[in-house]
Each structure stands twice: as structure tokens, then as C-alpha cells.
Amino acid sequence: MEALDIKLRKRIRHGRLLKAFLFLFLDLSLCSPSQAQGEFPFMTSDVTQVAGKSFDYIVVGGGTAGCPLAATLSEKFSVLLVERGGSPYGNPWVLEKGFYGFSLIQTDEFSSVAQDFTSTDGVRNCRGRVLGGSSAINGGFYSRASEDFIDKAGWDKESVKEAYTWVESKIVSIPELTPWQTVVEFGLLEAGFLPYNGYSLEHIEGTKIGGSIFDAWGIRHTSADLLKAANPGNIVVILNATVNNIIFESNGNASQTSVKGIRFIKSDGSTDQTYEAYLNQPKNCTSNGGDVILSAGALGSPQILLLSGIGHRKHLEDLDIPHVMNLKGVGKRMKDNPCIAVLVDTDPQNRQPEPPQVSGIAKDFKFIIEGGVIPTSFNATRMPIAAKIAFPASEGELRLNSSDPRQNPSVKFNYLDDEKDLDACAEMVQLLERVARSHPVAFYLGVKRQSNLMTSTDEQRKFCKENVKTYYHYHGGCTVGSVVDSEYKVYGVTGLRVVDGSTFRESPGTNPMATLMMLGRYQGLKILRERDHVSFSLRTQQNP
């Protein structure tokens, strides 16, 4: 243990020296090209610039998956990207690492970059409402999905790797550990999170340093930065516009429902006037048209489907929403990873906020543990060690509260409702306490190392029930096999897809951000290849 303390002291001293150097260097680097360069010329909040116009693809939701998806599709087709929030550029609460977590503290009904909601379980949560989505408000920890997740999804492994690499080459950095993150790293190792894997983007058992979307200057690079790869002549990004519903047409065939476009409103609540944008129609009956693609997240995408009349008939009739299709899986299989956190500091302090940089991944990937410094107000922070259950069995449901798309839907996750989850949580608390009461943590805080506070399984289960929180990794509501097929096309509707975390049955990796960005790129390329194949086939038929 003495050798461990000596090594820890050296790592902490090195981290403090490096931090001081970077602080001095930062003053000389304010014009660094690594910093975000501001608004894109194809961004607008003027709804009249898109109202009544047609596009090959309409992507609803400029979030973690929507931005790379829109950028990729714009390589060959015209794209409208609709985002209900504003621009992240110029907002220090989004861009600067020193303000990490501040965006979750002060929220409002229509304009804040984070929109609060509380599940009917009573757990406070939030969702991104800004270009870049949740990648603009989260901890920025970047880690790929496990091989098992990719196998279950049925994705092509080589294409997945290429899509991850595309994202990583543009916005991912290798973090330099802060002193506190070094302490967390040693605490995880002492608690048995082995082996030590160093820096890795892979989801592997043990302790590792993950990638970060914060660069060396502390500037956040959200998925919005991936729009730099878009073809500027082929894309329009409309901000502060909330999609009300999808517009359908029957084409004279009662058994076939096709998408015509979208209906949207201004997000600020200043008016209820609606606007419309449309899909370009195929040039002939044999050509392949584009799609409206929902990338509005695990709350937004099922909400839009329900508002459009796709879902359980009885629920829609109760809200006087015209029924289009009785797709009962919409809003079902909602899951959130139960989180338990232990505060290692005794009182609030005014420390610099720190997102997690190190992760402990338990055997069989059952639990994920991280530590950070989280602001609880604008002048106070706490230091939690937090863990989540990676594969919860409990699931819930999303339902509409009203027909106003700006209002949050009602969602119940049924945290720890399944006995298997409660047993897993009790086991997780044991691991969590090992890290929180470890020698490195006690040494760093200058306190005497404590023994585990909870000794019985009953105590641990009770603690779980009373203290369950969210890791903000909720998913489901439009799951593959229930609402969309393996191509992410909505069952029974032509020209409608969902590409985001609502399609997931489990949360990938340590967190879903990396995989959602990858999915946007992956599905975008897949759609482009499909269109090329159809065009080639048509040319071959016409010119045998």
C-alpha cells in the first residue's frame, strides 16, 4: 500500500504541474483552431426559409445521431435538419469544460439547452434541447459499444469500425487525467476492476481511460461539429423549430401509408402557427424516394410518432389524435439504467467541475462505475462516485400528456421493479463502496479510510430503493423488431425511419454517445449505398 501511495502522489503532482502548464498555455492559445468556429452558413432560425420547400431527406432532431446522419446524407442529396433548440456555438455552458454541468442547473420551459423532466417514478432527468443534443450537455466520455452489442444489432463490423473512426477523427481527444481522475483510477484498481487497460475506446472489462469530446483546451466538440463534413450546398439546418407531426398521404391505396412531409411550429411558444416542409417526390413510380428520419431521441421520436397518429389506438383516441396506424410498440420497452451514487466529500465545496475520464467496467459488463465533480449550484460542487446497472430487466412506458409537442411526454421507467435489478443493485453497492472507501480516495481527501457502511443485503436493497437515480442513458420506445425493422424503417409506413437511441433495447458501452454518433454515420452511408444500388439497377433495366 505504501508503494501505491507513492505512485499516487507522483501521478497527482504530475497532473497539477501539467494543469498549471495548460492554464498558462491557454492564455496564448485563445485563437487555437481547435476551438469551435461558430455558426454554419446553412443554419437559420427563419422558418420562412424552409416553409413550403421540398427536400430529398428530412431529419428530425439535430442531436447525437441526427447531425452525423444529416451530414452524411448531404453528400449526395438535399437535406433539411430540424432542431427544436438553438445553436451551441457561443454558449460557454455548452462549450467550456469549466462550466460542465451548469446547463443542467438552470432550465426553463422553451429555451434552455437542457429540458428537465421527472419520470412518474419520481426521478429527475433531462434531455438535450440544442444542436448537438445530449452531446452538448453530457460528460463527454467517449467509448464504443461492445462486440456483443454490435453482433446483436446485426451491423456489419467493418462498416461500424469505419463509422466510429470517422467520428473519432473529427471530435475525439485523448484526455490528460486530472488529479481527482487519477485518484478514481487507483480506487477502481484497488476495488478489483482489473485488468488495467490504459487509454482505450473499446468497451472492455477492467479500468480504462476513455476518449473525450473535450479537447486539450477544454473546448467541447459536440455532434454538431460533425456538420462541418456536410455538403453546404445540400443542407439546411432550421433551429428553434419543433415538429408537430408527420404528414401522410395514401396515394389512393388504403393499405399503404406514405410520408409526404412534416408539420412544425416555432419552439419559443410565441405562436401556434404551423409550417410545412415536404419530401421531394420520386421522378417516376420505379425510382426510390427519400425519407423523413426521426432522430429526436428516446423521448422525442416515440412522442412524434404518437402525435402523428402512429401508436396504440385507444391512447390516441383519448387525446383526439386521428389514428393512422395501430403500432402498439410505440412508447413501449422504455428503459433507463438505474444509478446509485455515493458522495465521498463531506460537505459542498467550490471546486472546478470535472466530467469523468476514467471508467470501471465490472466482470460480464454488469456494472459501470465513474467519478466526477458535479456542480449542485453556481458556487458549490459535490464529488460522487456513481455506478449504473448496465442491463436492467425492468422496463416502462411513454405516453402523451398533451398534443403540444413542446411539452414533455409522461414516462415511467419502473426502476428496480424487477427483483433481478434489485439484487444486482445490492451487489453494485458493494463494489461502489469499495471504490468510495478506498485508500486512494481517503488519501486524496485527507480523511481516514472508512469501512463499508452497509453490511447486509437488506440494507443495500433498501439503500437502492431510496436513492436510485439516473445515469441519463434512457432508451427504447421505438425498438428494433417492435416499431422499426432491421433497416430502421417504421413498420407499415413508406418513407419513414427512426435512427436514434429509441431503437435500442439496451444502452451500448459505458454510455451511448459514441455509438449514436456512429449509428448516424453508419445508417447514412447505408442509405446512400441503397440509393446507388437502386439507381444502378434502374439504369441496367433501361439499358440492357
Image (cartoon, helix red, strand yellow):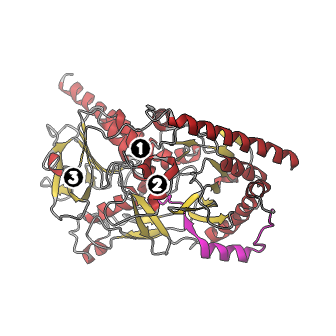
Q: Per the image, is 467 magenta?
A: yes
Question: Is 495 on the left or on the right of 117, as rendered?
Answer: left
Q: Secondary structure at mark 1?
A: helix
Q: Per the image, is 184 magenta?
A: no
Q: Dividing the image into 4 quarters, which one contains the C terminus?
A: top left
Most distant residue in the top direction: 544
Residue 299 occupies quadrant: bottom left
The amino acid at mark 1 is Ser
| CA separation in Å, label 3 and label 2 | 24 Å
Q: Which residue is mark 1?
A: 223
User: Which percent across, then down, holds residue 512?
Assistant: 50, 50
Q: Is residue 377 above or below residue 228?
A: below
Q: Is residue 95 above or below residue 116?
A: above
Q: Secondary structure at mark 2?
A: loop
Q: Which residue is mark 2?
A: 504
The amino acid at mark 2 is Phe
Residue 344 occupies quadrant: bottom right
The amino acid at mark 3 is Val
Residue sitting nearer the eye, 425 or 184: 184
Q: Which mark is residue 243?
A: none
Q: Secondary structure at mark 3?
A: strand
Q: Are marks 3 and 1 in contact (CB under 8 Å)?
A: no
Residue sitting nearer the eye, 406 or 12: 12
The residue stretch that appears in magenta: 449-476
Instruction: Look at the image and tell me whether residue 245 can be seen.
Output: no
User: Which percent across, then down, holds residue 539?
Assistant: 21, 26
Label whose residue precedes the other's in the sequence (2 or 1): 1
Question: Is 421 on the left or on the right of 44, as rendered?
Answer: right
- Quick one: label 3, few (<14), some, or many (20+) residues within 10 Å? some
Q: Which residue is mark 3?
A: 259
